[in-house]
Image: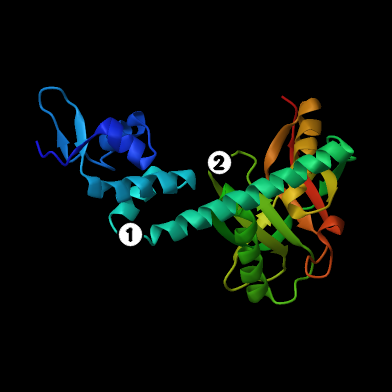
Amino acid sequence: MNEEYLPIGRFARLCRLSVKQLRHYDELGLLTPAYVDPDTGYRYYRPDQARAALLVGLLRSLDVPLPSIGRVLSGGTGVLGDVRDRMRADLARRERNFAALERILARGLPRPEVTVVREPARRVAVVRDTAPQERIGPVVVACVDRLLAAVGAPRGPLIGLFPLDPAQEVAVAVAVETATEVPGASSEVLPGGPHASATHIGPYDQVPLTTHALLAWVGERGYTPGGPLREVYTADPATTSPDHLVTHLMIRLEDPE
C-alpha cells in the first residue's frame, strides 16, 4: 500500500468529518476511498481527496442534498441553483405557515359564520393547470392571466376551483361566468344546488384556515361535501391590501348519509 495514504480516522480528522460519515459517503459512491485493505476492510484515502471531502462537509452544512452534492463533485455546479430555488420556495412556505400560526395565536381558530345558499347552475369559461403544493399560488396567478387574456373584461368575479382531496399535485382551475364560448378556455357548467358558504377576509395564502372551518361545519352536520371547493374572489389584489381581501368559499352539499 502507498505510504502516503491516510487511514480513515486520520483522514476524518483532517476533513472535519466522522468515520461514520465517510463510510456512508463511500456506500453512496460519493467519496470512494483510494484503497481498501482486502483482508481487514480498512479504508484509506489520498491527501488530495481532502478538498472533495471538505466540500461535501461544507455543502451538507448548507443543507444541500447528497444527490446534488454528487453532481457538484462531478463538475455540475449549476445544480446548486436548483437547490437554492427549492430552499427559497421552502422558506416562503415556512413564512406563510408562520403567518397563519400568528393569526391563530392572535385570533384563535377561525369560526366564520356559515350559511347555506342555493346556487344556480353557472356556465363558465375555465382554464386549468396542475401545481405542486408549494406552487399553487403562482400557478393560480398564471391561470388568472390566461383567463383574462382570453375573456377580456369579465362579467363577474373570478372563481378558483380546487379539489377537496389532498394530493402532491393539485388540479388548479380558474373560471368566470360567461354566456358565450371563449377561445382558449373550456366551456363548462358549475352545478347548482345547496352550498355551504363562508367568507374569508385576509391574505389568499390563509384561505385554508377558513376552508378548514367550513369543512368542519359540513362534517359536523353529517353532509358529504361535494367538490370542487369554490373560491370566489371579490377584490382586486392589485388595489387591495392582503389583510382586506375578501374571498367567498363555497362547498356543494350532498345529502346526509
Instruction: Please say if 23 is above or below 241.
Output: above
Q: Residue at x 83, y 52 (%)?
A: 202
Q: What amino acid type is highlighted by mark number 2?
A: Ala
User: Can you give x and y, in whole percent of width and height, for residue 117 in the image?
Assistant: 86, 45
User: Can you give x and y, in whole percent of width and height, for residue 212 in the image?
Assistant: 75, 37
Label disc, if present, on residue 191 of the rendered structure: none
Using residue 87 as the reference point, say whether residue 58 is left or right of it.
Answer: left
Q: What amino acid type is highlighted by mark number 1?
A: Gly
Q: Residue furthest front?
A: 3
Q: Residue furthest top?
A: 40
User: Can you give x and y, in whole percent of width and height, for residue 162 in the image?
Assistant: 65, 49
Residue located beneath label 1 in the image? 76
Q: Residue at x 77, y 56 (%)?
A: 232
Using residue 136 as the reference point, say whether residue 122 is left or right of it.
Answer: right
Mark whose residue sits in front, 1 or 2: 1
Mark 1 closeness class: few <14, some 14–19, many ≥20 residues within 10 Å: few
Using residue 75 as the reference point, say whether residue 112 is left or right of it.
Answer: right
Callout 2 secondary element: loop
Based on the displayed image, in which of its 4 quarters is residue 135 positioned? bottom right
94 or 177, which lies in front?
94
Q: CA distance from mark 1 to mark 2?
A: 32 Å
Q: Residue at x 33, y 36 (%)?
A: 12
Residue located beneath label 2 in the image? 167
